[in-house]
Image (cartoon, rainbow, N blue to C red):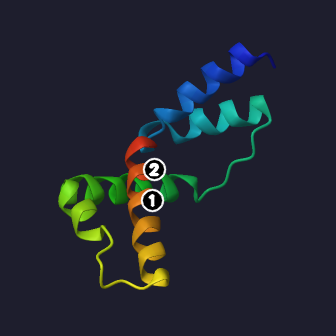
Amino acid sequence: MSAEELAKLKDELKRFNAANVRARAMICDAAGIPHDADILEWINGARERIARLEAAGDALKEEAWPTMFDDDASRKRRMDAIDGWIAAKEAKP
């Protein structure tokens, strides 16, 4: 499979939804990409999580910024939370 075909397949998989589960499974089979019955549940869960993060908006990010009262461990947890929020927003399905 060429890089162009793989890119096209990945683009198709981004538009994955419940209405075309079987068609996507056939595409995965044809391309040799492993798939699972739980993939739709995972995708829906990811979409819900991203929707919650977007609904929280920048307030979540502002609340997570470290303060002068944080120790190193809590500062790292807060920065990891911010990084996760940004990554989830950028990786929106």
Q: Callout 2: helix, strand or loop? A: helix
The answer to whether residue 7 is above or below residue 65 is above
Residue 5 x/y as whole percent: 70, 16
Q: Quadrant of residue 93?
A: top left
Question: Quarter of the image containing the N terminus?
Answer: top right
Q: Nearer the viewer, residue 65 or 52?
A: 65
Q: Callout 1: helix, strand or loop? A: helix
Identified at 33% across, 57% down, the residue is: 48
Residue 1 is left or right of residue 25, and the answer is right
The answer to whether residue 37 is above or below residue 63 is above
Identified at 48% across, 38% down, the residue is: 16
Label 1, residues with CA under 10 Å away: few <14, some 14-19, many ≥20? few
Question: Which mark, residue 32?
Answer: none
The answer to whether residue 66 is above or below residue 91 is below
Amino acid bearing label 1: Gly
Marks 1 and 2 sit apart, C-alpha to C-alpha, by 5 Å
Residue 81 x/y as whole percent: 41, 67
Q: Quadrant of residue 90?
A: top left
Q: Is residue 45 visible?
A: no
Amino acid bearing label 2: Ala
Identified at 29% across, 58% down, the residue is: 53
Identified at 36% across, 60% down, the residue is: 49
Residue 35 is left or right of residue 73, and the answer is right
Q: Can you identify the residue that label 2 sits on?
A: 87
Q: Is residue 21 visible?
A: yes
Count of numbered marks? 2
Label 2, residues with CA under 10 Å away: few <14, some 14-19, many ≥20? few
CB-based contact (under 8 Å), mark 1 and mark 2: yes
Q: Quadrant of residue 63?
A: bottom left
Question: Which mark, residue 84?
Answer: 1
Q: Nearer the viewer, residue 68 or 77?
A: 68
Residue 42 x/y as whole percent: 51, 58
